Image (cartoon, rainbow, N blue to C red):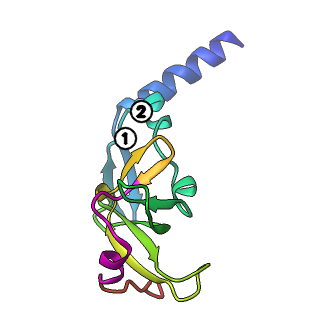
Amino acid sequence: MRTLLATAAIVATAALAAPVYVLAQGAPQTVQLAKLDVVKVATGYRASKVIGATVVNEANDTVGKVDDVIIGKDGKSPFAVLSVGGFLGVGSKLVVLPYEQLTTTGSRIVLPGATKDALKALPEFKYTSS
């Protein structure tokens, strides 16, 4: 049993360190897996916890709510979709901004320098059908 577990651990380690060859649509491809610090990643913010969160400015005035988080087509640039204005979701407008403009302080999500009026003045964001 110990030998089986040790062999499985060695195979798993080797699999993460070596490129994986994938056959997709008949053409061989190389996929490089990356080792991550899982402890560091675990201290981040889950999208499911960010979505629905209230966004405030540095004066602690509520300026919107996170409606969604979208990953750009490049796979690297996340965007925050904010719901602004309205009351209880009625009459609100969706706007989008780079996620990096938001800061987090404990459980608070802050958009420095934001006002409700400034966010309402941004172009309206609409989801595509795909």
On the image, the x and y values in percent for residue 36 come to 39, 33
Magenta stretch containing residue 118, yes or no?
yes
What residue is shown at x 58% (from left), y 15% (from top)?
6
Res. 63 image quadrant: bottom left
Q: Separation of disc 1 and disc 2 at Cα?
A: 6 Å
Question: Against 103, is 12 above or below?
Answer: above
Q: Quadrant of the N terminus?
A: top right
First to last magenta residue range: 110-122
What residue is shown at x 48% (from left), y 35% (from top)?
43
On the image, the x and y values in percent for residue 85 come to 47, 80
Check contact, mark 1 vs mark 2: CB within 8 A. yes
What residue sits right under mark 2 in the picture? 16
Res. 15 image quadrant: top left
Front residue of 54 and 70: 54
Q: Which mark is residue 33?
A: 1
Q: Residues within 10 Å of mark 1 (few under 14, many from 20)?
A: few
Front residue of 76 and 67: 67
Q: Is residue 40 left or right of residue 4?
A: left
On the image, the x and y values in percent for residue 56 come to 43, 59
SS type, badge 2: helix
Q: Amino acid at mark 1?
A: Leu
